[in-house]
Image (spheres, rainbow, N blue to C red):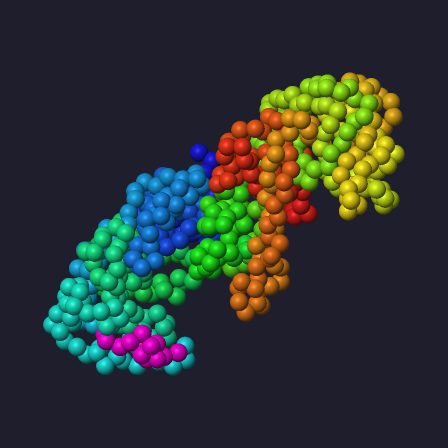
Amino acid sequence: MEATKATSSHFIKNVVIEDLQAGRVSQVVTRFPPEPNGYLHIGHAKSIWLNFTLADEFGGRTHLRFDDTNPVKEDEEYVRAIKEDVKWLGFDWDALYFASDFFDEMYNRAVLLIQRGKAYVCELTAEQMRESRGTLTEPGKDSPYRGRSVEENLALFERMRAGEFPDGAMVLRAKIDMASPNVNMRDPVLYRIAHATHHNTGDKWCIYPMYDYAHPLEDAIEGITHSICTLEFEDHRPLYDWVIRECEMESTPHQYEFSKLLLTNTIMGKRYLRQLVEEGLVDGWDDPRLPTLSGLRRRGVTSEAIRSLCEETGVSKSNGQADYRMLEHFIREDLKLKAPRTMAVLRPLKVVITNYPEGQVELLEAKNNNENPEMGSRMIPFSREIYIEQDDFMENPPNKYFRLFPGNEVRLMNAYFIKCEEFVKDADGNVVELRCTYDPETKSGSGFTGRKVKGTIHWVEASQAVPAEMYLFESLVKEDSEDAEDFKDRLNPASLEIVHGFVEPGMRGVEPQTKFQFNRHGYFNVDSRYTGGDRIVFNRIVSLKSSFEL
């Protein structure tokens, strides 16, 4: 299927080709290994796309594995959400694993390290450990517990597992080299104590492996051939290799790093996203302003557009940000032939066509998609009273304003020419109603060849119009705000505007997650959270046009 089509050439793909040709691997096995401590964002989509498409292209396998080694922050809710996101992107895993499936094996390998003199139990506090680790230019100092005997370490580690010590009392550390130029190799922590109930294993364990220890073991146990991760793990690769080698694993996976997918004008750090959600600054993990996959899906972004973005940005070792407008470009490209057109008035102004017969309603034909004739057409009502956009009328217009103003004539899309004769204001001086006349000879599609008008505006017939809410989004963060001390100071207070308008009667009862192009306004998606009963909420996915070019 399209989700697994061949990827463009890149350095990791070239490694895979060389490994297959040289016989170093017989089948490509990759994995996507999220920690279930939050919802996935668009940066994760790049890793999902790369792992699945790469394995599929060479007839391999991809595992979905949850790195659930920290019970304090993880939850079954996140597991369910991650599964849904992966499937929504168009991928399906060949096997499902949890790091916790391998806790017994990890413990046994830790015992092996102790027996081989490669690990020890350390009672330094976290602060003392930081102080003794050294700097990039100065070596670290050995822990006073580094010289413990194998027997003492084995006994203490077993007591840690038995729950005899409180959180933070001691850890198991690798015994590598406190003078290593790579700080990650200076006796890193392998296990810590955490008396917490695990979402998968309950209260079986009170010690949990650290990510840098668990991850390479999981890869080796599962038979992963190409362990693909982002660039921040490049300095961790020597430790990855050390764990596999010193734990005497039969399978030897190799780690490869690539640059993250980052987008302009948004927040992608998981801890910041969590803070936004927990402090109620956004409407949950699926807020349409967030770069989470659930938020993008609720907004109406298509999985096809995200996969196209991943393909276009490519796979490299060069960090950089992708312009958010690039994603918007792919959304438009994906929806332009799929989304039916409809008319919607976001900020309504009532128009009375004074010479149209009272009580008469006629049906006019409108195409569902001008660029895709196969989508056919629909019939829309027209009568004496309609709604137009407030900004399609001006009492005192500037030059080259071609919409309605006193004495001017415009075409109503799919309908007639109308001419503004007069207008009505309320007590505050706001225009609340227009009174116009129409020319019955100018019906759209009638072959009328008389005078021409420069302006065409959309409309909705008033008596059958369906009330709707439209959520209009701007960037969640202000441009040029990277220097703000508190990330919350970067938030754009105008990132959401809610307007109340009308849509065509055929939109009544529309299903959530249905996408439309609102003429002149952009692409909109029926909101999946608030739409129901008589309430319809539309999220604007993207405007119709952009200056961005690939």
Residues in magenta, as a range:
122-135
* 126 in the magenta segment: yes
- Residue 337, image x, y percentages: 60, 31
Q: Is residue 229 visible?
A: yes
Location of residue 212 with respect to 145 vertically, above or below: above
Q: Who is closer to the viewer here, 437 or 44?
A: 437
Residue 436 location (% of width, % of height)? 82, 30
Residue 295: say if magenta. Answer: no
Q: What residue appears at the point 75 percent right and 24 percent down from the top-left corner? A: 384
Report the number of numbered marks. Answer: 0
State the image coordinates of residue 13 (x, y, percent, origin top left): 43, 48
Q: Is residue 96 left or right of residue 490?
A: left
Q: What residue is drawn where x is 40% and y is 40%?
A: 87
Quarter of the figure that contains the N terminus: top left
Q: Residue furthest front?
A: 427
In the picture, residue 472 is in which quadrant?
top right
110 with respect to 478 (left or right): left
Judging depth in this view, the residue of 55 and 526 nearest the camera is 526
Residue 310 visible? The answer is no
Image position of 124 (left or right of 461): left
Q: Quadrant of residue 88?
A: top left
Q: Judge by depth and name the residue closer to the eye, 191 or 363.
A: 363
Q: Residue 545 sits in which quadrant?
A: top right
Q: Which residue is found at the position 63% from the left and 32% from the top?
A: 503
Image coords of residue 524 (percent x, y): 59, 38
> Residue placed at 37% from the left, 75% from the top?
181
Taking 406 as reference, is 76 left or right?
A: left
* 233, above or below 386, in the image: below
